[in-house]
Amino acid sequence: MATVQVLCPNGRRQNVKITPNTKLLQVLEEVCKKQGFLPPEDFNLIHGRKTLDVTLSVRFANLPNNCKLELVKSEKSRVEQEVVIALQLENGERLQGSFSPTISLWELLLHWETSSDSLSSGQLTSTDPSTAPPTHPVL
């Protein structure tokens, strides 16, 4: 298990154990919690002169092993934004829409079933009673 060292605004250094699949947001939140910098949405991580995308995992952030990061106050706070979600059906139809990131998969399927322009109304959440136990066609 590797570690990264994070230099905090108060001059202290915080070591964080990471794996390649650890999200940078997890590193940021752990450092903010341990050092008392709240809320974590007001801070960013910097490597060199580059602000890191905290949605990436360590593997995809192109960070070297045992790297040193810096915790800095961000110019604006991170806020939850809508995400675009697309669903490709077996018949070739593609459903796409903007949703809150907190929406569940079941709510997505219900939304697309009830929309007026969907050709698959009632097919996304219906069950097949001929099998035991009943199976959902999409899930």
Image (cartoon, grey):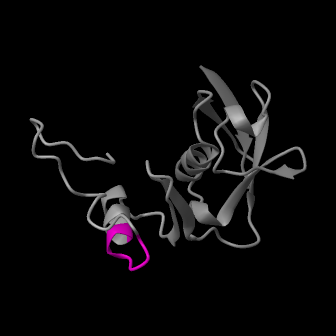
Of the pair 128 and 26, the residue shown nearer to us: 128
Q: Residue 125, image x and y in percent?
A: 25, 58
Q: Is residue 36 above or below residue 90?
A: below
Q: Which range of residues does the magenta coloring cover? A: 112-118
Of the pair 127 and 25, the residue shown nearer to us: 127
Residue 13 painted magenta = no
Residue at the limit of the structure toward the bottom, as seen here: 116
Location of residue 81 (image quadrant) = bottom right
Q: Residue placed at 38% from the left, 64% from the top?
A: 108
Q: Is residue 5 visible?
A: no
Q: Is residue 136 above or below residue 133?
A: below
Q: Residue placed at 39% from the left, 80% from the top?
A: 116
Q: Quadrant of the N terminus?
A: top right
Q: Is residue 11 visible?
A: yes
Of the pair 112 and 121, the residue shown nearer to us: 121
Side of 114 relative to 54 (left or right):
left
Q: Residue 80, image x and y in percent?
A: 55, 69
Side of 139 relative to 10 (left or right):
left
Side of 86 relative to 78 (left or right):
left
Q: Quadrant of the C terminus?
A: top left
Q: Residue 103, image x and y in percent?
A: 39, 64
Q: Residue placed at 77% from the left, 42% from the top?
A: 69
Side of 135 relative to 120 (left or right):
left
Q: Is residue 95 above or below residue 16?
A: below
Q: Residue placed at 60% from the left, 59% from the top?
A: 37
Q: Residue 135, image x and y in percent?
A: 20, 42
Location of residue 76 (image quadrant) = bottom right
